[in-house]
Image (cartoon, rainbow, N blue to C red):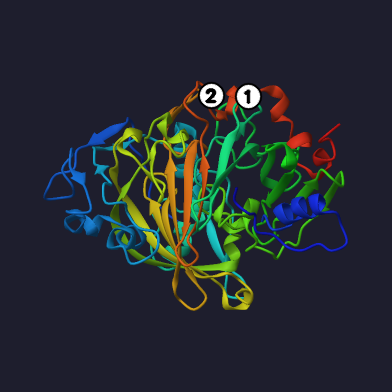
Amino acid sequence: MMARRGFAANMIPAAVAASLALLLLLGAATATFTWAADSVSSPASAAGGIASGTTITTSNWQQYRQFMPEGMQALFEGKYAWKMPPDVQIVVGPTVIHPLPTGYVEATNKYAPKVQMVALPDGGFTIKDYVAGAPFPNPSEPHKGWKVLADVWFRYIPHIIAATQAEPTSFCLQDRYDNITCDKTIFVYHQLMHNTDPGVPRDNPEAAGRWYTEWSMIVEPEQLKYTASLTLLYDDLTKPQDTYAFVPELRRVLRQNASSRCGPVFGSDFTRDDVRYGFNGEIPTFSSKYLRDQKILALSDYNMKAGAFPAEYYMPLGWPKPSWGQWELRDTYVIDVRRLPSQAQGYCYGKRVMYVDKETFAPLWEDLYDVQGKFWKIMMQCPRARMVPGLGIQTVTGSSVSAIWDLQNRHAARFVDPTNDGRDVLMNQQVPVAYQSIERYGGPTGLNEIMR
């Protein structure tokens, strides 16, 4: 079994210290923007991309390196302990574009022209007059990179997503000796403001300034059961996020340090700023520079085979097998995201290079560097396209596989969907009424109800 990384707690029992270690370290466009009206399949040509049906291997990968993020190239080059296995295959299919929900597109067209960037005294930015949709659907200079980051923050995601007791997700850690441990977790993510889903108030009367809430709890293994956390993201972007933890041995809720952004989530290589499907950082505390446009290979329409870890993965790397489905070329904005100099002291990353999908504004890949500028981690985001009730097929649904590889220490971690047994992450009206409670899953008082 894999040892969990944490901190010493000399004054409390070992079991309590384990839970504390786990939790306290959790860590304007004026033109109308129109997305595709229908799902579009665009087979890539050999001249403009990669021909559909192409299989990329360790023998021919250099022919296609222009379509790979730097981290993917590094895995193929074999320069780090993590590397592509010799029998790896990436099968390329057509690019499929699923249109964003009508309500989100209409809100973007109506409200984006009014959105303004506001400069802050420390060199950062926030926005004002944001209502709903994408704030900067056609990001352009000046400050194009930060506008893309704001679009990432407010990208479309179903207004409520839940993995319940009946369909828990897996969170798997892998150490340098390839020992693997997996926990079962449940979660409830709730967007309380700026909603565009039909039948949902744009701003929930119970929001009380909360824009988004993230609640999660371990249900297996037994020794960690009921360990839970809650993060509150506020409509005022300059207000620091609040994170709370429930420690079952103490039966207490603890408030965590708002400035601690680099603690490992669940003892893994993910930090607080890495979650929420690729980025959870407070955007006024970051600069973001636009680097380029780039087509990259991505896996964004896979099947439930992804849940069968490690059987359906190339091990020990943990890379998706062709059984998941076909990769596709996606158009991305590439941005260089760094903590502001005034906020950088004690921050873990020197820079984060994000590959942001142009259609959905979802991060598909990230290359993370330490404060000395050395390559540190690779993060791959694989969103799974699914039918959202009443909205059609969406690429970003809260169902995904998130993988992170620590190149310097040879650790890895993955959030994995439920296995292929009929269970799945639930969205919007699929979520049972009991899990829709904002009081229970969107505030610290709800954590006190655990184990009662």
Q: Secondary structure at mark 2?
A: loop
Q: Position of residue 159 (x, y in %)?
A: 59, 35
Q: Position of residue 1 (x, y in %)?
A: 60, 47
Check disc 1: other Cα within 10 Å, few if <14, some if 14-19, many if 20+.
Answer: few
| Residue denoted by label 2 | 423
Q: Which numbered disc flags the more N-terminal residue, 2 or 1?
A: 1
Give left or right: position of 390 versus 75.
right
| Residue denoted by label 1 | 166
Q: Nearer the viewer, residue 392 or 402?
A: 402
Residue 176 in the image: above or below residue 211: below
Residue 126 visible (yes or no): no
**Residue 269 has which mark?**
none
Q: Quadrant of residue 436?
A: top right
> Disc 2 and disc 1: Cα gap in Å?
7 Å
Look at 73% across and 63% down and name the residue there. 7
Q: Position of residue 334 (x, y in %)?
A: 37, 61
Kind of residue sitting beneath label 1? Ala
Disc 2, disc 1: CB below 8 Å?
A: yes
Give left or right: position of 113 versus 89.
right
Give left or right: position of 185 versus 442.
left
Q: Position of residue 154 (x, y in %)?
A: 53, 48
Residue 54 in the image: above or below residue 419: below
Residue 293 in the image: above or below residue 401: below
Check disc 2: other Cα within 10 Å, few if <14, some if 14-19, many if 20+.
Answer: some
Q: Secondary structure at mark 1?
A: loop
Look at 66% across and 23% down and name the residue there. 432
Q: Nearer the viewer, residue 145 or 120?
A: 145
Q: Nearer the viewer, residue 246 or 257?
A: 246
Kind of residue sitting beneath label 2? Arg
